[in-house]
Image (cartoon, coloured by chain):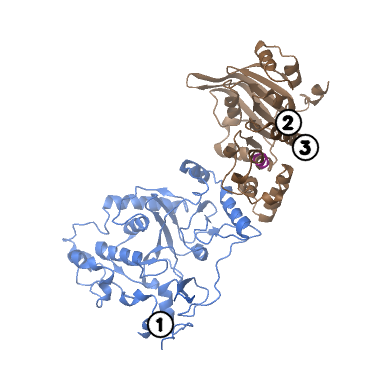
Amino acid sequence: MSAVATLPDAEEERPLLKVSRLSHYYGSRLGCRDVSLDVYPGEVVAVVGESGSGKTTLLNCLAGRLTPTAGSVEFRMRDGRLRGLFSLTEAERRLLARTDWGFVHQNPADGLRMTVSAGANVGERLMAVGDRHYGRIRSTALDWLARVEIEADRIDDDPRAFSGGMRQRLQIARNLVTRPRLVFMDEPTGGLDVSVQARLLDLLRQLVADLGLAAIVVTHDLAVARLLSDRMLVMKGGEVIEHGLTDRVLDDPREPYTQLLVSSILQV
Amino acid sequence: MTDMDDARFPPLSNSLPRGERGPVGGSGAGADAGVELNGALSPLVGESGREGAPGAVLDDQANLRTYSFAYLDEQTKRMIRRAILKGIAIPGYQVPFASREMPMPYGWGTGGVQVTAAVLGPDDVLKVIDQGADDTTNAVAIRGFFQKTAGVATTTRTADATVIQTRHRIPERTLQAHQILVYQVPIPEPLRYLEPRETETRKLHGLEEYGLMHVKLYEDIARHGHIATTYAYPVKVEGRYIMDPSPTPKFDNPKMHRSKALQLFGAGREKRIYAVPPHTDVVSLDFEDHPFRIQTFKEPCALCGAEGVYLDEVILDDRGGRMFVCSDTDHCEERRAEGHRGALSGESR
């Protein structure tokens, strides 16, 4: 079966991100509980569930934006060693966040600098890691704008002058320019109309395949999960209730809640 | 002398105590022009004059001195000095301090005045410049303020001064080891317009994440074809902190590099003090393919003929007439006294 073939061989490949028994509470209120998950290089994992099911809390914990109440998140650094995310210094964590990771926000305005040009938005990470050659930064920015289908003559425009779909593509370019190994996406297609969504998904799928990215995509849209992901987690009430290959979960849901979720969407 | 009459510029220069140490009891009306209040506090300042006997004023007046020296009380000065020492220990780092209200509005140099008050001693000779000139409102007012409250000698000659408070210029004459340059700073945070959150900018400084600063320079090149930032040009101090050199023209940035003089920066409204100790590396940021360059001027100073100095444009009439003259008035006057002449200096003769 083709879906199985795309799964990396656990013997050969070691997980890029290792999450064990992760819980987060907002005071006494539950965010997410007891989540364990391994993400392998080049694999896309979708986290689905309804609003308030703890998807975004989980994502923020994985990306180091929230400190979990319990459990651990470990990331395999370039030297091949697994490091606990919260044992890193803040400087190391931030360096990781702007080199090896990307974070695509649902609202592009959260992930972009709205007052500087598209080229500077794409170039910021390069400059942050020490690139000091204007011509090189600019040609890299042009290259990335072309990859996300933004015309070259828009390079000096503010993202404020861009449509929603273009902003989202710009945000993706900005995140991928340092060739991260792991990208977190929070509802990357939220708020876009259907045709723009389709193009964006196409683009994302292509980029993920080309660059061999691992990605964790949070979405409430099962169609997005179907198109992008290899595996998926279904969350409800802060817990993972079902976990498996995307096709298996969507075609043969086991949990009553997953069955409800799958049956409540339009056919894809 | 005739230079000044001839020059007609700056118009105020005739009424100022040019080159005099200690205008108190100095010659004529000029000395009091900028400092009318002098008389009101004469017991404090002393009529006796102090040429030749610096410090004598203090002894004479010790019993009269119910005021603190140099306006601020001793506890405040102590607090400011601690901030200054910390700033010197960590070059380029912005040290928060409990800025006081000063008898002048924010934006007029409240930070600089506090730093000056904290470092000034009775033997110091103070020079105050505003955009390079000794005779503009801000300079005259602050010089008068310290004449009144500290009774120190003042001068307009860079070479004679031990403490120079400046707004937006560094004197053309190379500063020496015994001199202190105090800058008035409006916005100490170089990352401010890129990152509005103070919590975040402090973190960026702490973690040395300065990519953002280059984003600003990138934007300049993208929009103008070259780095169009001409003042408050960001610098890296001693290979660590990015610093705003206050709104001095970038022309002056190279003068900060390994300067023999101590440089102190005070921002009163923003409550920050920072410092560049003597012989410290101060490097202007740039790109490899767009290196840092200072401004150049096509013509020399119209009064003294100086080249390679920073010039101000002066509009002469409403028909497009203009002249370029030294922004550093003391430098210009010294050169003219040495006999240098510019294109317009002899016109009325």
- Residue B79 covered by magenta stretch: no
For the residues labelled 1 and 2, the Cα–Cα distance comes to 76 Å
B158 or A206: which is nearer to us?
A: A206
Dot 3 falls on a residue whose secondary structure is: helix
Q: Amino acid at mark 1?
A: Ala
A206 or B189: which is nearer to us?
A: A206
To the question of a shared chain for discs 3 and 2, the answer is yes
- Shade of chain B as shown in the rendered figure: blue
* Badge 2: residue crowd in 10 Å (few <14, some 14–19, many ≥20): some
- Residue A171 covered by magenta stretch: yes
**Residue A167, x across and y down, in percent:** 64, 40
For the residues labelled 1 and 3, the Cα–Cα distance comes to 73 Å
Q: Which residue is mark 1?
A: B337
Dot 2 falls on a residue whose secondary structure is: loop
Q: Amino acid at mark 2?
A: Pro
**Residue A6, x across and y down, in percent:** 79, 26
Task: Please tell me which residue is depicted at 62% across the width and 40% down the height of the picture.
Answer: A98
Please tell me in which quadrant of the rendered image residue B221 appears: bottom right
Task: Please tell me which residue is depicted at 35% across the width and 53% down the height of the picture.
Answer: B81
Above or below, comparing residue B319 to residue B295 in the picture:
below
Residue A210, numbered circle: 3
Mark in the foreground, 3 or 2: 3
Q: Which residue is mark 2?
A: A41
